[in-house]
Image (spheres, rainbow, N blue to C red):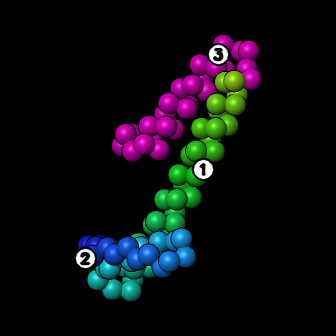
Amino acid sequence: MKISEIKIDDSQTGYYWLQIFVKNQKEAFSLRQQILEDQEIRERLQKAINHNQQIVTNSSIPMEIIICNMIIEKLQSILDGKDTQ
């Protein structure tokens, strides 16, 4: 899929509209789905990070803290796009 153009439109309502131009309708729907799925995945990763941070904050068990910190580090690297595996 090749994006041929991206426009940003100020609708004077406080919102901005992003228009992405692709080759055909099939690619447009596919790109829309990919963007929405990516957003959902990022939200789920952030929730998992927050959950593990809460465990670390409230735990008095050293092994649990170590494991949760490892999970946080891995999830954060995925969220930041640094983990490609």
Question: In this figure, which residue is indicated by the disc labeled 3?
Answer: 63
Residue 30 placement (x, y as % from top left): 42, 75
Q: Which residue lies furthest to the bottom in this view?
A: 25
Give the magenta part as a residue range: 58-85
- The amino acid sitting under disc 1 is Arg
Disc 3 or 1, which lies upstream in sequence? 1
Residue in the picture at 66% in, 20% down: 64
Q: Main secondary structure of the magenta part?
A: helix
Residue at 39%, 83% (x, y): give it.
26
Image quadrant of residue 48?
A: top right
Q: Does the magenta stretch include residue 81?
A: yes
Horizontal side, residue 36 vs residue 62: left or right: left
Q: Where is residue 79 in the image (x, y as percent from the top left)?
A: 47, 44
Tell me which label, 2 or 3, sits earlier in the chain: 2
For image coordinates 38% across by 86% down, the residue present is 25
Question: Mark 2 belongs to which amino acid?
Answer: Ser
Give the residue number, with chain letter if any, for mark 2. Answer: 4
Residue 80 located within the stretch drawn in magenta: yes
Q: Which is closer to the viewer, label 2 or label 1?
A: 2
Residue type (three-letter) at the residue carrying disc 3: Met
In-front residue for pair 60/20? 20
Label 3: element kind: helix
Q: Relative to 1, does residue 68 appear above or below in the rendering?
A: above
* Label 3 environment density (alpha carbons within 10 Å; few <14, some 14–19, many ≥20): few
**Local crowd size for mark 1, using a 10 Å CA cut-off: few (<14), some (14–19), many (≥20):** few
